Amino acid sequence: MIRIVIAGLQKDRIAKCVVAAGGDRVEATVTTDMDGAKKVKNGQADYYIGACNSGGGAALSIAIGLLGYGRCATVAKSGSKPDAQNIEALVSKGTIAFGIAEESIETAVAFIMDSLLKKHAT
């Protein structure tokens, strides 16, 4: 079971996308950014997905502070499209917190989930 915490704007929308992509292989928990980042840090969750208008600022600020800059990445900035290959590379290198812009939720979450499911298939 992949445990994902979800914070920021449009949390319920993100959670629906996570569950739609991962089915019974994922557990999606809607929470605050502080509680979500703490859960990942303490091993109570595996990954963090946050959304804001830009995809980088409020989506990841608390996660960066608690988990470290090198474990967090913006994967969908406002005005640009998420890149599946980039997300797969980030997951492969150990990124555990993902920031996305509201406008890219469906596409970005689908790419994130595809990469996480592949990583955890083995």
Image (spheres, rainbow, N blue to C red):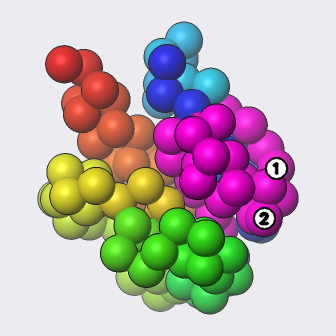
Q: Residues within 10 Å of mark 2 (few under 14, many from 20)?
A: some
Residue ID at (74%, 37%)? 29
Which of the 4 image quadrants contains residue 117?
top left
Q: Is residue 50 visible?
A: yes
Left or right of 55, for residue 91: left
Point out the stretch of residues depicted in magenta. 28-53
Residue ID at (51%, 40%)? 46
Q: Which mark is residue 14?
A: none
Q: Is there a contact, CB below 8 Å, between mark 1 and mark 2?
A: no
Residue ID at (79%, 55%)? 35
In the rendering, at what x and y percent does residue 90 appear? 25, 61
Q: Secondary structure at mark 1?
A: loop
Would you say residue 30 sits in the magenta stretch? yes
The quarter of the rendered structure image containing the C terminus is top left
Q: Amino acid at mark 2?
A: Met
Q: Secondary structure at mark 2?
A: helix
The residue singled out by tag 1 in the image is 31
Residue ID at (35%, 75%)? 70
Would you say residue 45 sits in the magenta stretch? yes
Q: Residues within 10 Å of mark 1 (few under 14, many from 20)?
A: some
Depth check: 75 or 40 in front?
Answer: 40
Q: Is residue 76 visible?
A: no
In the rendering, at what x and y percent does residue 65 appear? 60, 79
Left or right of 49, for residue 89: left
Left or right of 77, for residue 112: left
Residue 47 to residue 25: above or below:
below
In the rendering, at what x and y percent does residue 10 appear? 77, 59
Q: Amino acid at mark 1?
A: Thr
Give the spatial CA distance, label 1 vs label 2: 8 Å
Residue 2 to residue 62: above or below:
above
The residue singled out by tag 2 in the image is 34
Which of the 4 image quadrants contains residue 8?
bottom right
